[in-house]
Image: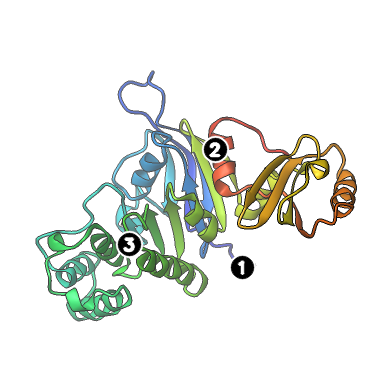
Amino acid sequence: MALIPPPAIEIRGLVKTYGTASDRPAVDDVTLDVHAGCVFGFLGPNGAGKTTTIKILAGLLAPTAGHAALHGHDVARERPAAMAQIGAVLEGSRNVYWNLSARQNLVYFGRLKGMRKADARTRSQELLGALGLWERRDDKVGGFSRGMQQKVAIAAALIADPAVVLLDEPTLGLDVEATRTVKDWIRGLARERSKTILLTTHQLDVAEELCDRVAVIRSGRVVADRPTDELLAGFRQRDLYEISVEGTLPEAALPDGFQVAAQNGTTTLSGRVKDPREVYDLVARLQAHDVVLRSVTQSQPGLEDVFLSLVRGEAPAHV
């Protein structure tokens, strides 16, 4: 019988308390599994405990209780083996040396990870070329823009081809083109190379676009952990509809209780119905006034809406 491989990231009963034991834990009994090839969004407001969790995974903090493992290697007890699995870009930390050039940084971090110098130089050329930095390879990073420094930090995290990549705000400070490059990289690393990406970001549109699964942490506890599409579906409000029509509406055609917004030659009606069959009556009423119908849609929440509901302690509409 084939053995089932361990999760790429395994967290069990993780607790981290600063100060005395009576203080509220920054991380409070967090348990998560993240499997290989998954882009996993780990989201939470400032102070929720996500950065502490990330630092424990990266071996920068010791947990008060519980454990974390990377591909079966316990971060605390098997630190060298665990750290060989991981590359990290931590937001708010200086991830590269500003007095070194871009190429020197990558070769240095590659050597720290045990790479031969020739291999590190070859890999640095590949990474800097992909990020559009090869022409600046011998310039000191301290003279780079914030976005360019972020690119070098991401390349440094990937230099040794780690199995797990922790990305804390990876697109922060990047322009549109660089953001697209990084997002394409993240997709390719997960889909084509089965890398596991743990992504934390306040740019929830980026998380919604990239993440296969999302966990939300609030006050040190995980309050949601589901595939992204299931999480969004759980907060879908089945009684809320939007109806779009061409042009403006005559007063007599306006349904009671619906909000009206007009923009660029389109009028959108938003409101709730007690029974979905009422939508047919609304559409017939509009057509009776010779209104050209464009669309009728059930309200679809975005990840930002879901995130705000969860951090406020609101329950989903359905599961």
Left of 111 or right of it: where is 223? right
Residue 78 location (% of width, % of height): 34, 53
Determine whether the residue tagged by mark 3 lies in a helix, strand or loop: loop
Mark 1 to mark 2: distance in Å? 42 Å
Mark 2 to mark 3: distance in Å? 36 Å
Give 115 or 131, whichever is nearer the viewer.
Answer: 131
Against 127, is 242 above or below?
above
Q: Quadrant of the C terminus?
A: top right
Q: Amino acid at mark 2?
A: Leu
Residue 233 location (% of width, % of height): 69, 49
Give 19 or 273, whichever is nearer the viewer.
Answer: 273
For residue 70, which quarter of the picture?
bottom left
Against 302, is 196 above or below?
below
Residue 197 location (% of width, % of height): 45, 60
**Mark 3 or mark 1: whose residue is earlier in sequence:** 1
Q: Is residue 96 visible?
A: yes
Determine whether the residue tagged by mark 1 lies in a helix, strand or loop: loop
Q: Dot 3 corresponds to which residue? A: 84
Residue 313 location (% of width, % of height): 58, 30
Q: Dot 2 corresponds to which residue? A: 308
Q: Dot 1 corresponds to which residue? A: 2
Determine whether the residue tagged by mark 2 lies in a helix, strand or loop: helix
**Mark 1 or mark 2: whose residue is earlier in sequence:** 1
Q: Amino acid at mark 1?
A: Ala
Mark 3 to mark 1: distance in Å? 25 Å
